[in-house]
Amino acid sequence: MAKRKLEDTNEASSDLAKDETEFTSFSDREEEKLNGEGHEDEQENSDEEESDEEEEEEEESRPTKKPKKQLSAQDVQVARETAELFKSNIFKLQIDELLKEIKIKDTHVVKLEKVLHRLYDLISQVPEVNDLSLQQVEAMFNSKKIVIPFPDPKPTKLNYKFSYLRPEDVALVGSFGLKTCTTSSRSIDVALTMPKSLFQPKDYLNYRALYKRAFYLTYLSQQLIPLSKKNNLPIKISYHYLNGDVLNPVLSLQSIETDNPEDLHFNKTKFTINLIAALPFGNFECKKLLPDKNCIRVQTENEDTALPPTPIYNSSILSQTSYDYYLKYLYTIKKTTDGFKDACILGRLWLQQRGFTSDINKGGFGHFEFAMLMSILLNGGGVEGNKILLHGFSSYQLFKGVVKYLATMDLTNGYLSFSSLIGEKTTSVYKSEGFQVPTVFDKNIKLNLLWKMTRSSYQELQTKAKETLLLLNDVVTDRFDSILLQNSNFNQLKYDLVLNLTIPDKLIESFNPLEKISFITFENYIKNKLSIILKTALGDRISLVHIESEETTTTFPINKRKPNTNNSSYIIGLTLNAEESDKLVTKGPNNEDKEAGLKFRSFWGSKAQLRRFKDGTIQHCVVWTATNEPIVLTIMKYVLDVHLYQDISMNLTSEITHFNNKLPVPLSGTSTSLANFTALRNSFEQLNKVMVGLDLPLNIKSVLPASAGVRYTSLLQPVPFAVSNPDFWNECILQFESSTRWPDELSTLEKTKTAFLLKINEVLKKTNYTSFITKDDSIPYNENISLLNVLTPEGYGFKFRVLTERDEVLYLRAVDNSGKNKALLQDVYLKFNAKYLGVVKHTRTISVLAQHFHGYSATVRLFKQWLDSQLLLSHFSNELIELIAIKPFVDPAPYSIPHSVESGFLQILNFLATWNWKQDPLILDLVKSTADDKLSDKLTIQAYRVIQSNFDKIRKSDPLGLKTQLFIGSKDDPSGILWSNEITLPIATRLTALSRAAINLIKTQGITESNLDLIFTPALHDYDFVIHLKSSDLTVSSGILPPNTFKNLIQPLTSFPEDITTKYDLTQAYFSELNDKFGNSIIFSIRKFPCNDNVICGLFMPDHLSKKKFRVNLGYNVKPTEDESVIINKDAIYDQIKIMGGDLIKSIDIKK
């Protein structure tokens, strides 16, 4: 192939540069004044480039002390920026390693260059043809073998001729030509510039140039087929819509593997070659192709009707003239900016991981647009033309600068203006008055570089840029993986609500000629119309709407004029605004605003009404009814029926209701409502006032809640008088005023606490509260703990345990004096800490976050339901589950904060499936927001390092995670093991395995009701034995509505039973007994919450299955073997299990 010649383009561009007018006719505005002659010289170096500094070791680790060095002012300045510099240097190392991994192999490059040279020779051999009529052209090709890919409408009668002349230039363009190609790239673009003599000045009108171009491609492909065979280059030729543009078909060449050793194959490189028939640069008058001009003339019923502009057509024509032109522009920038090439590669990778490419159907913003934007920002880009980027920036700084610009500048309501004329000193300027479409406008050739983007796709790109900018600015955590390595392009994880819409054929048939010339394809038209309808209807309820075609085929055989695609199925993704999405009233304008009121009633139809609100205003509004489906879905169904097509809502499907249906439905309220939790908290507040006001020898200082129900996270909602609910009793910590008279010995202290509780019990009997004392054995070796149980008139139960200022001191003293039993006593202290101290902090933190993140409560409850369905819930503490479930809300990277049950639940599963807990701790920054909160609330670098060092110490002694698996650290628990120290290795690995299986099923087969049922079905075949238990009807007494039952047929619970223990679940007591007796040799699992067919599953611990030498106190039932060893006696254990279960057991299945 001819070498890439970077000719000076000043001559070619000067004629176009004479007319400096932009497409100001979008709205009558002043011409842009060229400025920027007097820019200051760039600073070639920046603080962040000092990546060669080595991190100094701490003074304590050095063998000899060195004299302290006097700090200079420059050292102080560097020290102030250490956090950012350190992150930048680490990033630099990671970037260098990444670039090595994604670089194309040198052998592949050599092979591809050889192929390109041979291909160039073949193109040179193609014979020319001249002045063929349309009839001659169609007769030239066998329609069964090859067809001309004419764009719609297909020409029938033309008064101009078709010709094929040798290309003016054959040039490598795109990322391969710019040398920014990576292993993720799959195509090489070669532009064949068509000779100017083939075109007339007005061929930009009515598809003329595109028809000539289509013939040029077809003739070329027909000639290449025999030439390639003759010259040992076996290729398969297909048509391909470049970047999804139906006006721009190209030839896609794919290598065919043959047995002939002389053939030149390139299939191992996994690349295809796109032959692009490029229109000659500068051949058409650019200002005639501005986005607001009409270049497709059609007849209308009314001759006075002005034809609409054809922005897609115009931009496609212009872009087809500029492949080589823009490559030269980018190459000029690349020569003057060392970090440009690597920054382009980072930008490509960042966009690909988020699903963005230059394809119209995938956002319309890819590697080319990113590289062009970076080039423009190196020459200005600010409001007054100030430079956003400097040529001396590193690749990291250039990448971050472009991301920051995308995040902070609005290119829809404003626009970026620049000149691509090489050598011209005109600066690029941001202008605040935009065209309401994403715009980066090249004054030189009058092209909007973002013409393939919609307002919605730009808004989504801006959202991703904002999220990435937060990650880049995070100086505490390493975010490299989240930014560049993790793929975040799965719709159910990206959006809160994902819907499928099937468009009826009659609607497709109604696509009229004026709409066709504006939008070119029905797909573009329907996506635009849907977007307008949904944004108008949902307003502030959503922050983002994404619409894509479910089936998009851009490659098709050369015997087809266009691909056989059915553009009737569309995916709609919505990101919800949690504060607004569930409101039952859509408010409109005030009654006084007649014009706005008329528009509101016109849009909403019969649903619109006038209402007086509490503040006295009379407003137009629409009132919706709460059901099990989200309000947003109800609104969508209504407006699509009214404004798109009658009864089209029947074709609108969503999986969100399947997820909601998995949550237990309470006897009162809905499955996702917080009303029952609020009632519980109100009851607690009333009891709190009573307790604090009691006349006692020592006044109560505080009553602190410490239960899942009070923090909105209990699986079953707290329904009054539902005593069978395993979470019925809500624990609280009782603290008295300070006193020096508390005993200094634990058992005596506990007896003193019991005396106080007895006194409170005595006083409460004079009120309408019912109370009694019970013993508690949750702290090992402390058998004197007593609890005060209180039943409130509202129907709730609370358990109080007393905490004094002496408790922690005495437990720590026991640890210090423990000697050989230190590890045992440390576990006892951990138990005390969890029950008395940690749980209070945890409840306080989670309560605040649950109220801030509206989707968290339902999400964590669904996660608990999944764990319970898989018989895992009984192995994890509520607190541990809640911390795992909060991860997507406080640290959602690389996704967004979920605002729906579906998105939140799947993000949790996705995290668990990818979390390598042997090597990585989970460190949570438990604050409301990553952007708005004060820095003092966030996790500091020092606190992060303390938690990380705690994890490192644990893994140093336990590298395989045999003793400690899940490490979850936070400001409340720097130790990281407060809630996870009792988990066993089989349970932790099973959690990971089940999460992987579930998320893989959803990613590969999609979300259906049957798949969801499968995810919530336990895999019983993995256990050694399964005990089937008789069902006990505790559904209603647990506060749950039985399945397939109407609420009005169930009598509400209005009082406590005489003996509440009669409503307890006996299977849980049996489960506890089995654990007490066999827990050291068998891992038992059970469903914690009531269900029809409960089972207890058992798994023998692997180290107990092998033969052992007999010794006293082995700890489990054994039987002798022939070689004088002993082995576990499974039959005897099964017999004991049957005897203990008695009538509770239906059967036992034993794995053979």
Image: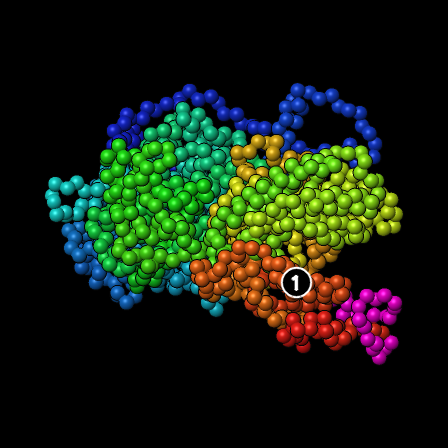
Q: Position of residue 826 (x, y in %)?
A: 79, 48
Looking at this view, name the residue that lies furthest to the bottom.
1122
**Label 1: which residue?**
1068
Tell me the magenta residue range: 1101-1124
Q: Main secondary structure of the magenta part?
A: loop
Position of the C terminus by quadrant: bottom right
Q: Is residue 848 left or right of residue 824?
A: left
Looking at this view, name the residue that lies furthest to the front.
766
303 or 494: which is nearer to us? 494
Q: Is residue 304 left or right of residue 917?
A: left
In the figure, 1100 relative to 867: above or below? Answer: below
In which quadrant of the rendered view does residue 844 lie?
top right
Q: Position of residue 441 (x, y in %)?
A: 34, 35
280 or 573: which is nearer to us? 573
115 or 482: which is nearer to us? 482
In the figure, 319 relative to 423: above or below? Answer: below
Q: Position of residue 793 (x, y in %)?
A: 57, 48
Q: Is residue 65 magenta?
A: no
473 or 315: which is nearer to us? 473
Q: Is residue 1110 magenta?
A: yes
